[in-house]
Amino acid sequence: MRKVIVTEFLTLDGVYEEISPWRQDYHPDDGPFKRDELFGSEALLLGRVTYDGFAAYWPTATGAFAERMNSLPKYVATTTRSTLEWNATPLGGDVASAVHGLKRQEGGTLLVYGSGTLVQTLLRHGLVDELRLMIFPVVLGQGKRLFADGDMLRLTLRESRDLGSGVLLLTYTPAGDLQARA
């Protein structure tokens, strides 16, 4: 059974959306971590907005990281596209069922970069095996948050790592599904 591993950049107040270039002032030493997770994965699982950004950049990039990024199969949560380029397959309307099917297949890790809306769906359906949160020391006070008001998710901390520049990498395993509290 394949695992779904999520990596998300977050502010201290849980914002994942880049409404301003809030990450540009921080220079964490995350290169080895990002390289290890990419090379340790067998496929990428992406939301459509993340896919669009990546597909605009990576096909023309060079180097070992770019080669690996370009060679991996990509599964994209989209309801607006029936065909994709860049070695990508659309998941269609029922993302949770599609990802559940991918997890049942033999093979390695499915890596999710960013893709906050997709991650929320995966968490609500208990499809995330590991959640890697890169927490940046900034509070925005507005923007899309990974966990909405009323969401509850129990997590078990597996590892914490200081990446420098005040950025922490916190690795969790969910101890249940994301649930909206009544």
Image: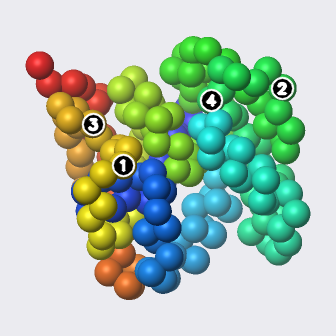
Mark 3 vs 1, N-terminal side = 1
Callout 1 crowding tier (Cα within 10 Å): few <14, some 14–19, many ≥20 = some
- In this view, the mark in front (3 or 1): 1
The numbered dot on residue 77 is 4
Q: Earlier in the sequence, mark 4 or mark 3?
A: 4
Badge 3 amino acid: Ala
Q: CA distance from mark 4 to mark 3?
A: 20 Å
Mark 4 and mark 3 residues within 8 Å of each other at the beta carbon: no
Asked whether disc 2 touches disc 4, contact meaning CB atoms under 8 Å apart, the reply is no
Check disc 3 and report the residue beneath it: 148
Q: Residues within 10 Å of mark 3 (few under 14, many from 20)?
A: few
Q: Earlier in the sequence, mark 1 or mark 4?
A: 4
In the picture of the structure, the residue carrying the numbered disc 1 is: 143
Disc 2 and disc 4: Cα gap in Å?
A: 12 Å
C-alpha span from label 1 to label 2 = 30 Å
Of the two numbered discs 1 and 2 on the same chain, state the one appearing first in sequence: 2
Q: Is residue 82 left or right of residue 109?
A: right
Q: SS of the residue at dot 1?
A: loop
**Three-letter code, disc 2:** Thr
User: Mark 2 vs mark 4: which is more N-terminal?
Assistant: 4
Residue at left offset 23%, top offset 49%: 156
Instruction: Name the residue tied to disc 2.
Output: 83
Picture residue at 52% right of the left edge, 50% below the top? 114
Of 23 and 111, which appears nearest the observer?
23
**Precedes in sequence: disc 3 or disc 2:** 2
Picture coordinates of residue 150, whole percent (x, y): 18, 31
